[in-house]
Amino acid sequence: MKRSWWLLWLVSAAGAAPASLCPNGSFEAALADGLPPHWTKVEETTENLTCRLQAGKVGQAVAVTAQGGTNGLASPRLAVDRTQTYLAGAWVKLPEDCSANLKFALGDARRAWTSTGITAVRGTGEWQEIRIQDRLDEWAEVTHLGVEVTFFGEGTALFDEVELLAVPKLAGNPQILRSGNLESGADRPDGWYRPLSADNQPVLFGWLPEAAHSGARGVRVSGGIGGGVWLNQGVDCEADTVYTLTAWVKVTAGTARLRVVQLHNREDVGQVESEALAVGDWRQVRMTFRKTPEWPATHHIAVGIWVPPDAAADVDEFVLDAKPAP
Ligand SMILES: [Ca+2]
């Protein structure tokens, strides 16, 4: 009995990806009445959009052809559970003079009246991934949510592997640190900055399901042989406030540290770090800091993780919380 409990704990601690709530999001079912089953048209002008199935990112994709404006497909809306954060992802492939959007359609059981979490990408002719997360806290009256994937322009866009996930909300104040769960963006998580490696190759950084502690994505950072990698986000820091930065970290080589850098005119003028984190399984790391009189007048700081040369770590679930100083 005890053993099976541990097994369950290990599975959930390892961040097994939740199942998608978006039916036929991989577009494997044959079209019905010209549309993928479970999906409805999003059209800027009527009779503008046609669909067919063709080889996709995985199995089949839906190819949507339109003659201009914004057009695409909407998933069914489902009832919102306010204890959850909703995440969505899609793969898109479209011409270079088109752009694609992924967003949440919000409303009630009858209709959607607004949208949130929009991320857009310009076409490249290659497959690109877009991921978003909800901002339902700003929409108290919303009861239902679905996913819309659309493109702007004239031509044919391919959509594939559209998923909608619900994961438990992170603690902390989401207004301070953007996308701390690393779940939204295109090619990299929104709001997070990482320098290129010493030879300008963005090879030391992966936005990967395998690096997730929870949800569908985490970040794998490797210091490589260059100057190391500093994955960070700039935030405002107020006086008379105690901040707590937490993150889940799994170090796989060397040692890494959570780091807070004080910025003045974009210059690094001082920093505080967590203890050195050694190789091991996922652990939640916590550090507290506050703006002291020694800090310059600026209130801009960067928070994140420092992975030095020859070290590597997976990281997820950054949370920055603030309390008035005692
Ligand atoms: Ca995550």
Image (tube, rainbow, N blue to C red):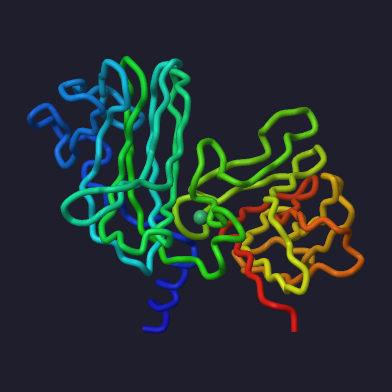
Tell me which residue sits at (21%, 35%) in the image.
28
Which of the 4 image quarters holds residue 18?
bottom left
Question: Where, quadrant-wise, is the C terminus in this rendering?
Answer: bottom right
Q: Position of residue 43 (x, y in %)?
A: 23, 29
* Image height of 186 relative to 52, above or below: below
Q: Is residue 52 visible?
A: no
Q: Residue at x 22, y 24 (%)?
A: 45
Residue 74: x and y, percent? 25, 40
121 left or right of 47 in image? right
Residue occupying the far left of the picture = 33
**Looking at the image, residue 321 lies above or below residue 59:** below
Is residue 179 among what the camera can see? yes
Q: Position of residue 195 (x, y in %)?
A: 73, 38
The mark tally for this picture is 0
The one of 24 and 326 positioned closer to us in this rendering: 326
- Residue 17 coordinates in the image, percent (x, y): 40, 55
Frontmost residue, 41 versus 166: 41
Asked where in the image residue 158 lies, by quadrant, the reply is top left
24 sits left or right of 138 in the view = left
Q: Residue at x 66, y 76 (%)?
A: 323
Quarter of the picture containing the N terminus is: bottom left
Which of the two residues, 177 or 227, is positioned nearer the viewer here? 177
Q: Farthest residue toward the right? A: 294
Viewer-closest of 31 and 319? 319
Image position of 288 with respect to 109: above or below:
below
Which residue sits at x=23%, y=35%? 27
